[in-house]
């Protein structure tokens, strides 16, 4: 019996595995969106500075650029590799699918990223040291390279939602994967939001400037750009909603909008009011307002947006063919990939995963809870925490605290095995694995045992 091409299971107590990437990703998005948006703002501001002979605007660009180097590029350089590590251990087959589809797209993105990093240093340190025309060309090159890195990444992120048609499944073509159904709408959302983030940070930097004329002129350039970016994001989001698959629309309607919609409307309203105020009253911009607003956008705007986007993909992590638990959901002839759900149902995860300890491949009364815990980690932990009362999608809590093994097993045999819950993977297991998984979940919900760790059965001599 051939094993599945699965990898060791990565699990972080209380938050599961995918949320590690999510938390790192939110920090990275805040930094990267600010840097890409700022690159375009620099190009616009420098063009205005030379056309209107306003050298003080160049001083602001340099200050903002130094802030960017310390804030966005250091944080981005730390969290970028952190995302790669987190997604590789949490979703190795998903990452493998992306690499096999987009290896040359990623290579191109790294070329543009190299230009971007060199460009921001050159922009800051060569300002006033080379002729204006050459520096302006450098600034626009930096801006376009920055935006190009985002454009290429958006194609990959959009494919993670779904290809949008059957073409890619049969051809395996990178073009069919990249130019997917929601690519342009997603690109519009990102472009608009990066302009908002960069404008808010720019006004924060501007609030520290003493020159009233500089504050007035720069604020009246930045604020309209930020407002336009915000409205672009909203319009593109409306379009984006029309490009989503059924499972994403259901997840959004049932689980996400009720939780996050009011907060995101509040973020849009507060940011709009602030930018209008900065446009009309640029001399009244204050750091003590700009900093809390930036944090408000990051916590109540970026975090929900990223969580919504990640959650809407469920039960998949890539292209509607790799489930969040790494099991292949459907055939992809264009890539020579075959579905694995029924094979798991026939043989069981404990038999097919090459990294299962030998002592757990056969379930016994002595190791049933330990085997059930391992099954929960392999089948559920990419989306759920396994501890009762955990803050992020506690698996035991999803059963209402029930310790009824038969009730839990009936759910696994019924809705889960039949795939009737659109945003959960179709999970088919042999009867003995269903019973072990149900026993572990019920064990977590028993009041007297909920805080007791599952004991590991020592290997027999």
Image (cartoon, rainbow, N blue to C red):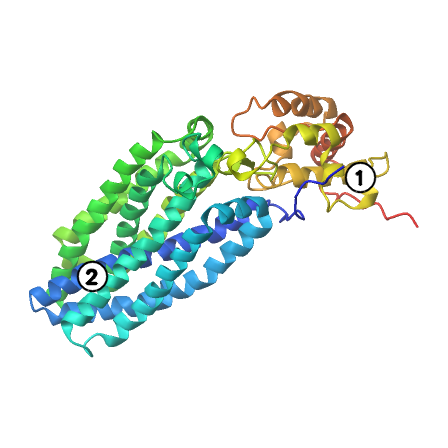
The image shows residue 53, relative to residue 435, as above or below, that is: below
Could you tell me which secondary element the residue under label 2 belongs to?
helix
Residue drawn at (65%, 37%), measured in percent from left and top? 379
> Residue 436 or 39: which is nearer the viewer?
39
Give how far apart the Cα atoms at labels 2 and 1 are.
Answer: 61 Å
Between discs 2 and 1, the one toward the N terminus: 2
Task: List x then y, in percent, for residue 271.
Answer: 26, 46
Task: List x then y, in percent, for residue 386.
Answer: 65, 40
Residue denoted by label 2 = 43
> Residue 216 or 383: which is nearer the viewer?
383
Residue 313: in sight, yes or no? yes
Task: Tell me: 106 left or right of 264.
Answer: right
**Label 1 crowd bin: few (<14), some (14–19), many (20+), radius 10 Å:** some
Task: List x then y, in percent, for residue 241.
Answer: 35, 31
Residue denoted by label 1 = 361
**Which image quadrant is residue 444 in?**
top right
Task: Tell me: 267 left or right of 374.
Answer: left
> Residue 397 or 164: which is nearer the viewer?
164
Per the rendering, the mark at residue 56 is: none
């Amino acid at each position: 019996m051939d094993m599945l091409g699965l990898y060791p299971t990565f699990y972080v107590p209380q938050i599961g595995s995918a949320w590690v990437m999510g938390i790192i990703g939110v920090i990275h998005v805040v930094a990267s969106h600010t840097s890409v948006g700022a690159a375009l703002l620099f190009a616009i501001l420098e063009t205005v500075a030379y056309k209107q002979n306003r050298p003080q605007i160049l001083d602001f660009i340099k200050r903002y650029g130094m802030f960017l180097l310390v804030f966005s590029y250091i944080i981005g350089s730390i969290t970028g590799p952190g995302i790669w590590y987190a997604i590789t251990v949490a979703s190795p087959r998903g990452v493998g699918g992306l690499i096999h589809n987009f290896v040359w797209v990623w290579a191109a993105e790294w070329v543009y990223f190299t230009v971007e990093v060199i460009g921001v240093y050159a922009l800051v340190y060569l300002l006033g040291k080379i002729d204006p025309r050459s520096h302006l060309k450098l600034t626009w090159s930096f801006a376009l390279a920055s935006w190009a890195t985002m454009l290429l990444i958006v194609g990959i992120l959009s494919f993670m939602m779904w290809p949008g048609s059957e073409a890619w499944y049969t051809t395996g073509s990178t073009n069919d994967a990249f130019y997917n159904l929601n690519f342009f709408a997603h690109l519009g959302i990102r472009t608009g939001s990066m302009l908002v983030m960069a404008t808010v940070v720019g006004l924060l930097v501007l609030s520290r400037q003493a020159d009233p004329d500089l504050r007035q002129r720069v604020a009246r350039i930045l604020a309209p750009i930020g407002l336009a970016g915000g409205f672009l994001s909203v319009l593109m989001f409306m379009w984006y909603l029309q490009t989503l698959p059924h499972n994403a629309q259901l997840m959004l309607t049932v689980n996400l909008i009720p939780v996050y919609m009011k907060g995101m409307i509040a973020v849009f309203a507060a940011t709009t009011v602030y930018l209008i105020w900065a446009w009309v009253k640029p001399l009244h911009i204050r750091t003590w307002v700009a900093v809390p607003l930036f944090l408000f956008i990051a916590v109540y705007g970026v975090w929900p947006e990223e969580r919504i986007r990640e959650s809407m993909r469920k039960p998949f992590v890539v292209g509607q063919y790799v489930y969040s638990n790494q099991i292949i959901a459907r055939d992809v002839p264009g890539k020579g990939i075959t579905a694995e759900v029924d094979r798991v149902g026939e043989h069981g995860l404990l038999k097919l995963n090459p990294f299962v300890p030998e002592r757990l491949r056969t379930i016994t009364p002595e190791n049933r809870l330990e085997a059930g815990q391992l099954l929960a980690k392999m089948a559920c932990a990419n989306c759920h925490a396994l501890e009762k009362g955990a803050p992020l999608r506690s698996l035991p809590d999803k059963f209402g605290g029930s310790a009824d093994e038969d009730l839990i097993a009936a759910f696994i045999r019924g809705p889960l095995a039949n795939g009737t819950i659109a945003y959960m993977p179709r999970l088919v297991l042999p009867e003995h694995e269903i019973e072990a998984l149900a026993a572990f979940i019920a064990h977590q919900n028993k009041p007297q045992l909920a805080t007791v760790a599952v004991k590991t059965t020592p290997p027999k001599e």
